[in-house]
Amino acid sequence: MGFALDFLTRYTEAVDEFLDHIVTGDETWAYHHTPESKQQSMQWRPSNSPKAKKCKISISAKKIMASVFWNRQGILLLKFMPPGTIINAAAYC
């Protein structure tokens, strides 16, 4: 509770300077390929023409872990984990 009150006190004293020092981060899987939705891939064709063949693509087959850190002014760090890295505490240290 004490930390939260200190946080709010600093915020009220110098809003802009305080907000400039807040950094947050997140991890996400970035896919190498984003397949079109059924709606996006639709196309007009004559009724007597054959349907276009579509390959099934597994989006989970090609992906990489991205770690992103930012503040209110924009992205500070964008880091991609090397392929084959086991995601655990050792990967972040």
Image: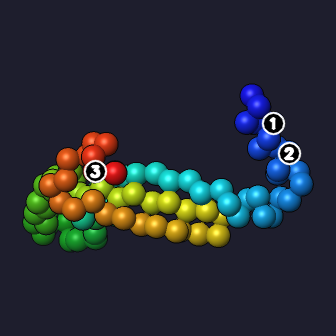
Spatial CA distance of label 2 from label 1 is: 6 Å
Residue 9, disc: 2
- Residue at the location (85% across, 45% down)? 9
Image quadrant holding the N terminus, namely: top right
Residue occupied by mark 1: 5
Residue at 83%, 58% in the rendered image: 15
Within-10-Å neighbours for mark 1: few <14, some 14–19, many 20+? few
Residue under circle 3? 91
- Residue 31 percent location from the top left of the image: 28, 59
Q: Nearer the viewer, residue 77 or 57?
A: 77
- Position of residue 3 measured from the top left corner of the image (x, y, whole percent): 73, 36
Q: What is the x, y in percent for residue 45?
A: 23, 71
Q: What amino acid does circle 3 point to? A: Ala
Are the residues flagged by discs 2 and 1 in contact, CB closer than 8 Å?
yes
Residue 8 versus residue 39: which sits nearer the camera? 8
Name the element at disc 3: helix
Asked if the residue under mark 3 is in contact with the one under mark 2, i.e. CB atoms within 8 Å, the reply is no
* Residue 57 in the figure: left or right of residue 40: left
Residue 42 showing in the rendered view: no
Q: Nearer the viewer, residue 87 or 48?
A: 87
Vertical arrangement, residue 48 with respect to residue 63, above or below = below
**Disc number placed over residue 85 in the picture, else none:** none
